[in-house]
Amino acid sequence: MQNVKRSAHTPKTQTLARLAKLNFLAFGIVITIFPFVWVALMGTHTRSEIFSSPPPFYIGDNFIDNYYKLLEIMPFWLVLWNSLFISVMGTIGAVFFCSLCAYGFFAFEFRGKNIIFTLMIASMMVPPALLLIPFFLTVQFLGILDTHFALWFPAIANAFGIFLVRQYMVTAISKDLLDAAKVDGASHLRIFLVIVLPLIKPVLATLGIVMFIGLWNNFLSPLIVLSSPDKFVLTLALRSVQSLGDSPWGAVMLGTFLSMLPLLIAFLFFSKQIMAGLTAGAVKG
Amino acid sequence: MASLQLSNLSKSFNQTKVLEGLNLMVPEGEFIALIGPSGCGKSTLLRIIAGLDEPTSGDVLLDGQWVNELSPRERKVAMVFQSYALYPHMTVFENIGFNLKISKIPRQEIRQRVTQTAAILDLEELLERKPSQLSGGQRQRVAMGRAIVRNPNLFLFDEPLSNLDAKLRVQMRDEIKKLHKAIKTTSIYVTHDQVEAMTLADRIVILNDGVIQQIGTPQQLYNTPVNPFVAGFIGSPSMNFLNGKWEDDHKTAIILKDGTKLPAPVPKSNTHFDASTQNDILIGMRPEHLHLRPAMSEDIQVKGVLDHIEPTGAQNYLKVRVDGQIITATDLQQSQLQSQQPIELAIAHKNLHFFANTAHE
Ligand SMILES: Nc1ncnc2c1ncn2[C@@H]1O[C@H](COP(=O)(O)OP(=O)(O)OP(=O)(O)O)[C@@H](O)[C@H]1O
Ligand SMILES: [Mg+2]
């Protein structure tokens, strides 16, 4: 096909087409990256520079001042640690327990299995905003208001994760494999740990990233759960200083930029697995 | 090693009966082939014996012990799956050694036993490969290795050679035969290839629609099939059947629809045939017993018209129109014959099979 196409076009139109494609891609990249660069740049300017016209689209010299200002208005590194702790705990827990639960749905036949699974899927359709008040009341009832536990623990069991992992298992693991392991004498726990987990790594990476980003960016639940500033997470802390009449925008932008770094780094390391996980099943059918 | 006994075993999935009232006794060390058409319940039976499925009713006994509620692990059975079911993320070595590792056998011994097994199966060069880097035949051998590296009570093979090409299949068949001679573990071998069953098994169990049709040695099944199903299932090309009726109440002769008269069955070869109760009779003739020659004494003459010839190289199969249907006869001489020419076939009286025709009742 490609050869036929090539011979049908002159080299000139071909280069033009390629150029157009490259331009299009470059445009996409610029649009995507611009906000990040802009935030990073603003982190190096003072408040008055930021609001000057034209806006300063270059690296300023106020980086150090902004940094000290940032530490002054919030315990930045503590807050970053809080975010990291909640995100990591929630991610690890969710990846492990969602796959464990998915294994239950995948490997066992029991009465009411389909009904339970359907109910679980249906629960994903409830708008998150509707859940805020019940969530608050539950957390209050359990006496875990103003704790990090209330933020990462409920995230561990989530319908989306269970659904995602189970669907992946269905395409990636044949039932015969489980039976073979049973005949080989493996217990269910061992089958899960030694046979199933290694085979579903791509979807675990996907779920891990999705969970991590979700928990990292989560704003609403910390807002209603947390009250002491030393327990704040990044989203909350960065938002809370913006309500000041005279917001130190340079410092806020620096904090925002720093808070994006962990995600960027995680993505650099795991992008391959994420792609593999998101597109898996597409080829296997 | 253990003996296996199935008693009154039945299995239904919801309303569908898959196995019905199976009884089977397999003494220690015997090699049993289980054959039957697709969907007759062979895999289901094997899974019940392995402990992967539960029977709806009936008992499974290993060495006289009731094992219905034991897990596959406790039953100590080894099974080769039709789909191989190799662990994709483990090397050949780890695949073969998985059971030993679970059984907490010392590392040194695992290495030794896996290497030994690999030598038997000619897999030594491949031990560090993953299943995805193996050919179908090699995967097959790894699946076998995973079973024979153990010391199981029972081997269960579920159509282990069905995915191989003809040549490899014969080679692996010999390998299995050698292996069983050497280690003599009780084995149940599912196949729908009758040649495989005949060459490997001490006894063959024929299953149809979840019911055991006949159990016997290959010779017994070939020489004295108890019903038309077994008769048609064993032997290739399969047995010809003609419809007939008793000539009169004396039951001394059978008349075909076209008027050909056959003498009554020889009692010896038809112990299962109760001549007194049936009027509709099926007469079975194996193609290899029908000879292209005039009848001699002790022979029955079958007259027909040649429809066409199917050459296979070593012999020709003559398709002959007799009594309004086509029957097959083996012609070892590969005679030059014309289509539509009249044919005289002869079959020894002792090679005729008689069955009650229950089909249209
Ligand atoms: N889990 C199940 N639920 C419902 N019906 C089933 C189930 N497993 C098997 N069956 C049915 O039981 C019958 C026997 O199946 P089985 O797999 O034992 O056949 P088989 O003899 O092994 O066939 P083949 O030679 O094609 O492998 C089939 O009709 C099948 O549809
Ligand atoms: Mg089968």
Image (cartoon, rainbow, N blue to C red):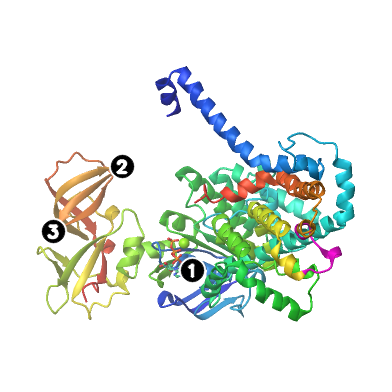
Q: Secondary structure at mark 2?
A: loop
Mark toward the start of the polypeptide (2 vs 3): 2
Q: Tell which residue pokes out farthest to the left in this image.
A: B259
Q: Nearer the viewer, residue A221 or B298?
A: A221
- The answer to whether residue A196 is left or right of residue B48 is right
Q: What segment is highlighted magenta in the picture? A: A226-236
Q: Residues within 10 Å of mark 3 (few under 14, many from 20)?
A: few
Residue B185, can we see it? no
Both on one chain, marks 2 and 3? yes
Location of residue A164 by image quarter: bottom right
Location of residue B301 by image quarter: bottom left
Q: Are marks 2 and 3 in contact (CB under 8 Å)?
A: no
Numbered tag placed on residue B44 in the rendering: 1
- Residue kind at label 3, given as amino acid type: Gly
Place of residue A42 in the rendered image (x, y in percent of width and height, measured from the top left) = 77, 42
Q: Which residue is mark 3?
A: B324
Q: Look at the image and say whether residue A230 sits in the magenta stretch.
A: yes
Mark toward the start of the polypeptide (1 vs 3): 1
Is residue A252 placed above or below B351 in the rendered structure?
A: above
Mark toward the start of the polypeptide (1 vs 2): 1
**Disc number lying in front (1 or 3):** 1
Q: Which residue is mark 2?
A: B312
**Disc number lying in front (1 or 2):** 1
Place of residue B169 in the rendered image (x, y in percent of width and height, measured from the top left) = 49, 47
Q: Look at the image and say whether residue A277 sits in the magenta stretch.
A: no
The number of callouts visible is: 3
Q: Nearer the viewer, residue B147 or B265?
A: B147
Disc 1 residue: CB within 8 Å of ligand 1 = yes
Q: Secondary structure at mark 3?
A: loop
Both on one chain, marks 1 and 3? yes
How far apart in space, not on screen, are marks 1 and 2 (Cα)? 36 Å
